[in-house]
Image (cartoon, grey):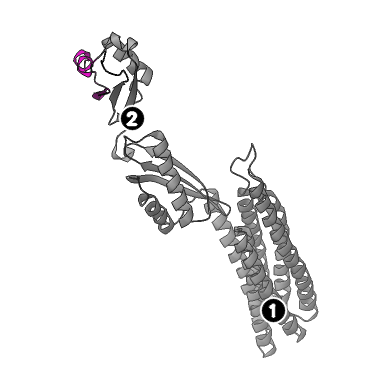
């Protein structure tokens, strides 16, 4: 891994740590205020919202640990890097939120069903709810901006978790106003809604992480964009076996490229490098592209026969048929196409030729594996 790449990873970690610590401090302060005021002034919704803020603190701690791990460069045990730690952290955070949300929803539903009289919240509940809305909306915008700049799904996910805390504070505000207006059950209903919001956000995090861990590919639209970029590259005849998967914020791609069978290995490699360039221009998040150069479309039911002779075997066959080749400078070009070998024999001797192409052709038989034979010699 280059020094510049490691420097970028270190910078991303510092940016993620800074915004996460700021958010964690804000969440801790708001969570403490909500829980205390919720208990003192009879608002179960504000108390649950305080629990929601403390789940943000827990998620921030998870983010700090996971970002440290995921921003490490590749090593011998993790040659593709450590981005999957970010995915794992997001899944753990989501599972935690589902559990908290489910427990709080059930607790408040049971309270509504079993309580004969519900308390009316006091006016400080409105003040704390309003402060929470303003504070969480600010930290959401700040965190999302940093997450998009460093291309971190985990930081962006944490930002949206902060936005849900702002939404839940709106629910608290509405529930408290309704309870003060003579509908005390609205505060309990608001508490249940907030708990459901917590569980819903957790489910979204968990499901997206599971999809990544089972190597779900890119969308059909993005896949088609990559296919078009490859097909529009000069020298590419066809594209198949285009596969993709995500690893954290990065995309990994595998693709087979069909090129003309007569081109050289180096030209085929150059065509592949041009495809890589065009694909990365199409989707900048792509980190790694593995391409395979095909001389024919092996999706058409053509499977290369492993029993076809090797270069060494073909050279021995030629020398057995034409012993004079041992005393004549020559080289071979082989094309394995259509389950046969097409042979080009180049006689390197300058005129007068000790061995003519006609002589070679007359001496050779036609084994089943031989598709064609062409003999070339200098003029």
Residue at the location (60% across, 40% down)?
79
What percent of the width, then of the height, locates residue 378?
27, 23
Q: CA distance from mark 2 to mark 1?
A: 66 Å
Res 328 quadrant in image: top left
Is residue 362 within the magenta segment? yes
**Label tally:** 2
Mark 1: which secondary structure? helix
Q: Is residue 256 left or right of residue 302?
A: right
Res 127 quadrant in image: bottom right
Q: Which residue is mark 2?
A: 304
Residue at the location (75% across, 70% down)?
26
Q: Residues within 10 Å of mark 1 (few under 14, many from 20)?
A: few
Q: Is residue 205 left or right of residue 61?
A: left
What percent of the width, then of the height, locates residue 340?
28, 26
| Image quarter of the N terminus | top right
What span is colored magenta in the figure?
356-379
Is residue 51 within the magenta segment? no
Q: Is residue 187 left or right of residue 254?
A: right
Q: Nearer the viewer, residue 352 or 347?
A: 352
The image shows residue 259, relative to residue 107, as above or below, that is: above
Task: Inspect this view and state whether residue 185 appears.
Answer: no
Q: Earlier in the sequence, mark 2 or mark 1?
A: 1
Mark 2: which secondary structure? loop
What percent of the width, then of the height, locates residue 235?
35, 45
Q: Which residue is mark 1?
A: 134
| Image quarter of the C terminus | top left
């Amino acid at each position: 891994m280059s020094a510049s790449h490691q420097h970028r990873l270190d910078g991303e970690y510092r940016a993620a740590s800074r915004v996460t610590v700021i958010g964690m401090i804000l969440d801790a302060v708001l969570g403490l205020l909500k829980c205390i005021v919720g208990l003192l002034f009879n608002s179960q919704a504000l108390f649950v919202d305080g629990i929601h803020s403390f789940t943000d603190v827990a998620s921030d701690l998870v983010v700090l640990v996971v970002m440290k791990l995921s921003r490490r460069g590749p090593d011998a045990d993790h040659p593709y890097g450590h981005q999957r730690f970010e995915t794992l952290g997001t899944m753990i955070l989501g599972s935690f939120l589902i559990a908290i949300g489910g427990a709080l929803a059930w607790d408040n539903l049971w309270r509504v069903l079993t309580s004969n009289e519900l308390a009316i919240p006091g006016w400080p509940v409105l003040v704390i709810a309003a402060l929470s809305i303003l504070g969480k909306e600010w930290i959401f915008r700040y965190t999302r901006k940093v997450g998009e700049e460093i291309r971190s799904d985990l930081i962006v996910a944490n930002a949206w978790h902060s936005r849900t805390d702002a939404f839940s504070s709106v629910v608290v505000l509405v529930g408290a106003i309704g309870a003060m207006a003579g509908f005390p059950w609205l505060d309990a209903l608001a508490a249940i809604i907030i708990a459901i919001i917590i569980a819903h956000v957790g489910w979204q995090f968990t499901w997206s992480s599971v999809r990544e861990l089972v190597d779900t590919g890119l969308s059909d639209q993005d896949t088609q964009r990559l296919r078009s970029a490859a097909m529009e590259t000069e020298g590419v005849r066809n594209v198949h076996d285009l596969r993709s998967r995500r690893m954290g914020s990065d995309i990994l791609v595998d693709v087979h490229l069909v090129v003309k069978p007569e081109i050289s290995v180096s030209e085929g490699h150059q065509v592949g490098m041009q495809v890589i360039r065009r694909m990365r221009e199409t989707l900048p998040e792509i980190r790694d592209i593995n391409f395979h150069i095909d001389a024919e479309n092996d999706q058409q039911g053509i499977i290369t026969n492993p029993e076809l002779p090797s270069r060494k075997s073909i050279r021995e066959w030629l020398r057995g048929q034409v012993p004079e080749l041992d005393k004549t400078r020559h080289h071979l070009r082989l094309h394995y196409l259509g389950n046969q070998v097409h042979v080009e024999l180049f006689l390197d001797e300058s005129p007068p030729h000790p061995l003519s192409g006609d002589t070679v052709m007359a001496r050779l038989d036609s084994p089943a594996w031989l598709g064609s034979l062409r003999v070339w010699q200098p003029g």
